[in-house]
Image (cartoon, coloured by chain):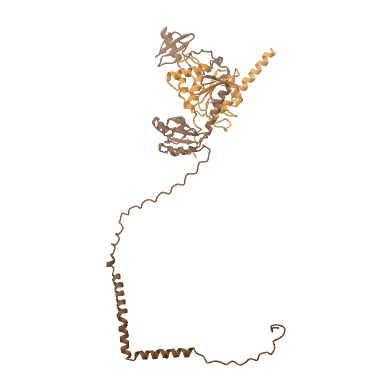
Chain colours: A orange, B brown
Amino acid sequence: MLNRVFKAFVVLTMMAGIAMAGSVGGFKSPDGKENMNCPLPESLHQRNTVGSDGLGLCVYASAKHTGQWQSEQLFIAIFDWMKRHPGGSYPTKFTATLKQCAKEKGLPYPDYVQIQDDDIEILKTACKNGFMPGVTYGYSPTGRYNGKRISHMVSVVHASDDWFAVLDNNYPGEQNFEWLSPSEFKGAHVSPSGIGWKVILLTTPPPPKPRYK
Amino acid sequence: MRFVLSLLLMLTFGLQADAQIFKRGTQYYSCQNGSCTKIAPPANPLNVPELPLGTKGVGEDFPTGVNPEGIEQGHSINGVKATKAEVYSAVETALPELSKKWRLVVVGTMDQRKEALAKIGTKDSVVVNVFPPDHFYVKDMKPDKLITLMRPDGEVVADGGLADVDKVMDFTKVGPFDPQPKPPIPKVPDPAPPTPDPTPPPAPAPAVPWYANIWHYIWAAGGVLLTIFARYGFPLIAGFLTTKLGPDAEAKIQALVDEVAALRSKTNSYAPVSLPDVPQPATPVAGGNGWK
């Protein structure tokens, strides 16, 4: 009995912590100190949908965000292509669907890497250089999805030593980015198994915003 | 019954222009233009197992789509398994390169972009991004610039049109953060040819031939007269003077000359002067030279 009460207390404490963490905002970090690495405009935000079997296409919606940002046609095209195929994805399926789509549409197959581990440093390196990775997301630290566990993929649009920003394809919009501390992000990224899946497209990202003298 | 089923599926999935395959429970349907028919389960064209989702999201508005069972620790490059070191190396060695290279953005229609790229060529130190005019990135750039050269941090160094490609690419001869070489001293342009005066200058005076100059004749005549005078004038003058002085003119002249000589010698001569005698000491003064 005491054990159950203790467990319930721990779970409630964790859920309260999760619900209170992070914040939702725009292209600047909540402290106003950092501009977003990959400020994808709202007109290019892709709302998630389902494949032919009713399962979600979040992996491909995230891939479309990446493709839009890094001007990669196959990553853009695969979202619509997947609407006619069963949804849901994982690393080997993602590769198979990319190859099939490239073959059918006659699009070149780009360079990309997939990483399944608990590291988030690579995301900082990628974002600092203008790349927009797709990553798994086990729950929303800002309390979306009623705080429930999810099997989801989102786009990382900013990653630094102080802040991570997430574009969730179920919450598109320029004021809907989730700004999280690195530890908050890591917790959501690797939940629940301790392994997070990252997709990083290696095609050339756009240069930083031009500054005229 | 079929109508009701079609209606139900239409309401569920919406009107579809193209044939789409849907799964409801274990039954598959093909729907097109509002009509749905049962079909056999389609073959899996991807030849990958369909794994269950971890969660189905929260409500139909928030679908999720990751199959956790298919995620194992590992790494891959382009879908091919690789070691962690290989993958991190691929990312970490490729990405920082961007922070050391020039960024050249080409914005224009397909033809303009092709033409510009052909003229620019390839250069290791330059990363080129090509965008159509309606790309989101372009809204932060100056309009009507076909090419824009930036440092890795986004500072614009030069821009221009197709005619400016060579000028813009000259900047990339050094690294993006190296000081630019001093431009060569500009060649002083040749002075522009004088603009022809609409009113023609006055025509030069026609050259006067030597024989037309009156002063030549005057000097020549003077010379002739002087020669004649020297040859005949002096004797004539001498004869004239002789006539005036009489037959003994020479003797008179000689007398005058002698008189003048006598006067001169008289003027220059002095009478001799006798000085008084001064007594001399008998013996020299002893003790020296006489000064005390």
The furthest residue to the top:
B1
Q: Is residue B252 above or below residue A9?
A: below
Kindly tell me whether residue B104 is visible in this rendering. yes
Which percent across, then down, holds residue A22?
Answer: 59, 26
The furthest residue to the left:
B212
Q: How many marks?
A: 0
Quarter of the rendering containing residue A103: top left
B38 sits to left or right of B90: left
Q: Is residue A117 above or below residue B125?
A: above
Q: A3 or B188: which is nearer to us?
A: B188
Which percent across, then down, holds residue B90?
Answer: 54, 25
Q: B37 or B180: which is nearer to us?
A: B180
Which percent across, then down, holds residue A122?
Answer: 57, 26
Q: Is residue B225 above or below residue A14?
A: below
Which percent across, then down, holds residue B278?
Answer: 63, 91
Q: A4 or B141: which is nearer to us?
A: B141
Residue at x 43% of width, y 20% of height: A105
B52 sits to left or right of B135: right
Residue at x 32% of width, y 82% of height: B234
